[in-house]
């Protein structure tokens, strides 16, 4: 998934070695293992094609992941009905963001019998791409897990990507929000840094323009929560904590990111809408609307959100979810690392404020 642009270089270094050796097929195998560790045996899951630069690429990833899960026989993979898949595949919002609204998730679950919906996105460029998946409960719409791994394109990936037919006619910031942030940056006391943070909210198709705009704004909440969670998680080193070795480092890190996201996702900072782009159409005799909004947040508001993250609450949630009883010193060490990671993120964001 999305992150603070100031920390992109740091994350690039962190994951570079893995990205140079992993391919899409390898990270899909890792995704299969992660999903199985997150869900109870026999859970009914529905896999939706990840949003991707090309439809064939997203379909391939979903089919390969489905095949791996079916063959392991630990989970029940719900057959993807044509109407559900066709409805999502034609939505530009999902193809760009990998986001499905809570209402849509519950509707899809009701229609298919799925207990968990797996959605995601494949994005990147050059020799570095990322697969991001989300596991969402149909009953509660709770985020149950996140899987985020970088990989390197191979022959199969490049062949699928070559069939990409990106939509035309929309503003560039819809497809490249990081570029949009650069476009709107203003010079400050720190070169290349402003007092603002930018991102894009995207709605699903609705029957009302007002509802569509509201949902586009609401999607920013999840975007910001995931940005913060990803950056904080990247600064934690749990390899020295023996209590997590049995569960695997990657699994534990993903649990940490999910716990951080859930800890802060209800806090939405104030923002300023810079640009709107609306689409409209008619399907089966009904008008629909699709809205994109480019917004900016004052970094002071982002700082307030980061300050409210609670390392103790996050650690308690992780321990409860993993059903473990770590020694007091290891629990305290993870709390200390989370606190330091949060404080370091705060320092970097504050550097952009200067005297403005």
Image (spheres, helix red, strand yellow):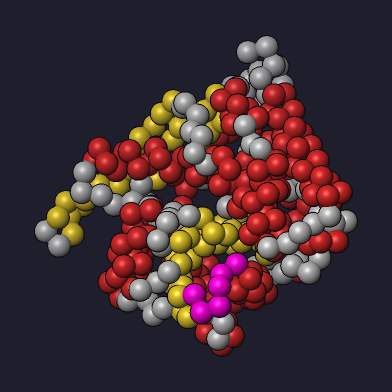
Rendered location of residue 29, percent (x, y):
64, 76
- Residue situated in front as seen by the camera: 140 or 299: 140
- Residue situated in front as seen by the camera: 83 or 170: 83
Q: Is residue 279 visible?
A: no
Residue appearing at x 79%, y 37% in the figure = 340
Rendered location of residue 94, percent (x, y):
40, 56
Q: Splitting the image into 4 quarters, where does residue 24 fall?
A: bottom right
Residue appearing at x 31%, y 67% in the figure = 110
Q: Is 165 positioned to the left or the right of 297 in the image?
A: left
- Residue situated in front as seen by the camera: 269 or 89: 269
State the count of labels: 0
Q: Is 81 positioned to the left or the right of 183 in the image?
A: left
- Residue situated in front as seen by the camera: 181 or 344: 344
Q: Does the magenta stretch include residue 41?
A: yes
Rendered location of residue 54, percent (x, y):
47, 65
Residue appearing at x 50%, y 70% in the figure = 57
Above or below, comparing residue 168 to residue 4 in the picture? below
Q: Is 132 positioned to the left or the right of 56 in the image?
A: right
Q: Quadrant where the C terminus lies?
A: top right
Decide whether the magenta segment is chiefly helix, strand or loop.
loop
Q: Does the magenta stretch include residue 171?
A: no
Rendered location of residue 251, percent (x, y):
69, 63
Residue appearing at x 33%, y 73% in the figure = 112
Q: Splitting the image into 4 quarters, where does residue 157 fall?
A: bottom right
Q: Residue furthest top?
A: 355
Q: Is residue 78 visible?
A: yes
Magenta range: 38-43
């Amino acid at each position: 998934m999305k992150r603070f642009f100031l920390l992109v270089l740091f994350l690039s270094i962190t994951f570079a070695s893995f990205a140079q050796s992993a391919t899409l097929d390898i990270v899909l195998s890792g995704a299969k293992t992660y999903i199985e560790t997150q869900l109870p045996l026999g859970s009914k899951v529905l896999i939706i094609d990840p949003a991707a630069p090309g439809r064939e690429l997203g379909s391939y990833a979903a089919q390969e992941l489905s095949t791996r899960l079916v063959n392991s026989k630990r989970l029940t993979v719900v057959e993807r009905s044509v109407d559900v898949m066709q409805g999502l595949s034609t939505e530009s919002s999902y193809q760009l963001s990998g986001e499905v609204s809570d209402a849509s998730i519950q509707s899809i679950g009701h229609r298919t019998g799925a207990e968990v919906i797996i959605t995601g996105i494949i994005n990147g460029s050059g020799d570095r791409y990322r697969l991001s998946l989300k596991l969402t409960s149909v009953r509660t719409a709770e985020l149950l897990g996140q899987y985020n791994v970088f990989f390197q394109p191979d022959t199969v990936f490049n062949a699928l990507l070559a069939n990409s037919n990106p939509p035309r006619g929309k503003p560039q910031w819809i497809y490249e929000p990081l570029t949009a942030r650069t476009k709107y940056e203003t010079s400050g006391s720190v070169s290349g840094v402003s007092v603002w943070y930018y991102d894009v909210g995207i709605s699903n198709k609705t029957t009302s323009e007002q509802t569509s705009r509201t949902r586009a704004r609401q999607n920013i909440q999840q975007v910001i929560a995931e940005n913060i969670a990803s950056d904080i998680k990247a600064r934690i080193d749990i390899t020295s904590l023996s209590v997590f070795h049995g569960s695997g480092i990657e699994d534990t890190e993903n649990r940490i990111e999910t716990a951080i996201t859930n800890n802060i996702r209800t806090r939405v900072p104030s923002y300023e809408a810079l640009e709107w782009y609306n689409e409209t159409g008619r399907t089966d005799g009904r008008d629909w609307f699709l809205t994109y909004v480019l917004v900016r947040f004052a970094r002071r508001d982002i700082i307030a959100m980061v300050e409210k993250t609670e390392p103790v609450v996050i650690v308690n949630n992780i321990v409860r979810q993993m059903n473990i009883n770590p020694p007091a010193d290891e629990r305290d060490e993870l709390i200390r690392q989370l606190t330091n990671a949060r404080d370091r993120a705060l320092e970097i964001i504050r550097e952009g404020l200067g005297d403005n």
